[in-house]
Image (cartoon, helix red, strand yellow):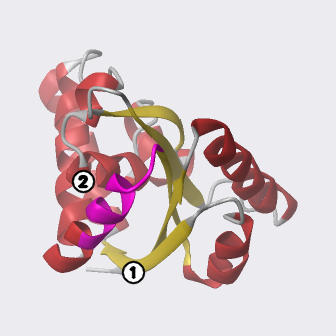
Amino acid sequence: MAIDTFMVYVGVYPSVALAEEDYDAVKDLHVKANLIDAYDAALIERRPDGKTKIVKKHETPTRVGGVLGGGIGLGTGLVVALFPFAALGGGLLAATTAGGALLGSLTGHAAAGMSRRDLKELGEHLDSGQAGLLVVAVSDMGAKVERALRRAQKVEARQIKADIAEIEQDAKAAGADAG
């Protein structure tokens, strides 16, 4: 079992527009470093009814998301672990049974890769703003990602551990079960 350690960065914003600027900055950072396939990001919005919606996401195609072509990775899995109804609001469960199984698997892996305390703190952190940006990045890009979240009112960082081979195996199984 090969466990990879990633960094999770969560920025809290007063508006979706500011969060989107940092979302683009994180993407540009990875493009310039030729690491566009080395991070996941999810931009979330807190709606007036209190529910959370995934507005925009980037998932690493060579890591999990490309397995079923579903575009779902650790970033989305972590958002759903923090805010289960985000899957419904973002239309993530509407596509297929395989997509739902993959999302459930990724959510489980994302939640298992962090302590309950860290998950709770990140969720509470995101609750304090109107928008949030969650980035899962390779650990050696950490300081650069944190600097790219310059428009955030607050930024929290945590480690997440994941067995990418096991996640990919679960994703393939989800696809086979649906077929």
Identify residue for label 2.
82
Q: Is residue 135 visible?
A: yes
User: Which quarter of the rendering shows the C terminus?
Assistant: top left
Identify residue for label 1.
159
Q: Is residue 55 above or below residue 162?
A: above
Q: Is residue 99 visible?
A: no
- Mark 2 is surrounded, within 10 Å at the Cα level, by few (under 14), some (14 to 19) or many (20 or more) other residues, namely many
Residue 94 found in image quarter: top left
| Secondary structure found at label 2 | helix
Tell whether 101 sits left or right of 172.
left
Q: Which residue: 26% across, 76% down? A: 118
Please name the amino acid that badge 2 sits on. Leu
Q: Magenta stretch: residue 123 in it?
A: yes
Tell whether 167 sits left or right of 133.
left
Foreground: disc 2 or disc 1 = 2
17 or 55, nearer to the observer: 17
Q: Which residue: 17% across, 35% down? A: 101
| Secondary structure found at label 1 | strand
Q: Report the span colored magenta.
A: 121-130
